[in-house]
Amino acid sequence: MPPYFADRRPEALATGGTIVALLCSDPRLDLRKILVLDGTPCPPVSIVRVPEGRATEAIKAIATMQAVLNPETIITTKSCLDCGMIHVSDRDVRDRLISIAPGENDLIENTKFGEIRVPIKEDLTVLRASTWIKKSTRLIGFEYDTHTGVLDEVQYLKPDW
């Protein structure tokens, strides 16, 4: 039986030993099975999932996790090559959303939905710039190849980090 959260929280707050992971909605991306950090199997991970795995959509949830669990690391991971959003254009998403919510036409037309080739670095930048995320938090970005199962770290470090 898993431990009760109330039992685990004091240790998490004291040690910061947990990880918060921002993931896309792709169920093939099971970070608990594929992640090894510094040569050791994955420690406890709290997962935040949103379509496309974008930090701008998840910042409130990530900040809440940071306040509750005090993680020392936040990871953003995206599947590459076969991400579901690669197979859908912004126009397709917009057309479908407009048919669902025709009164939101202007908002929908001015929203970007797909194009996930570069967002790992963008998400790291959003997380680092957020006043809700502690500056001491380690930020790591990964690209996950859904065909090979390979997880590659995205090398990105801004000079002021």
Image (spheres, rainbow, N blue to C red):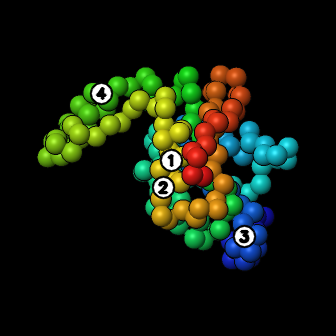
Q: Residue furthest right?
A: 39
Residue 24, given in percent of the width and then of the height, sits at 52, 41
- Amino acid type of the residue tagged 4 in the rendering: Asp
Q: Which residue is mark 4?
A: 92
- Residue that badge 3 annotates: 12
Tell me the CA gap for discs 1 and 2.
Answer: 6 Å
- Amino acid type, callout 2: Ala
The residues tagged by marks 3 and 2 sit, at their Cα atoms, a distance apart of: 24 Å
The residue nearer to you, when weighing 67 against 101, is 67
The residue tagged 1 is 125
Which residue appears at 74% of the width and 39% of the height? 34
Mark 4 Cα-neighbour bin, 10 Å: few <14, some 14–19, many ≥20: few
What is the quadrant of residue 33 in the picture?
A: top right
Q: Residue at x 21, y 45 (%)?
A: 107
Which class describes the residues within 10 Å of circle 1: few (<14), some (14-19), or many (20+)?
some
Whether residue 86 is visible to the viewer of this picture, yes or no, is: yes
Residue at which label 2 appears: 129
Whole-percent x, y for residue 94 in the image: 26, 34
In the image, is 46 to the left or to the right of 59?
right
3 vs 4, front mark: 3
Mark 3 Cα shell of 10 Å, populated few (<14), some (14-19), many (≥20): some
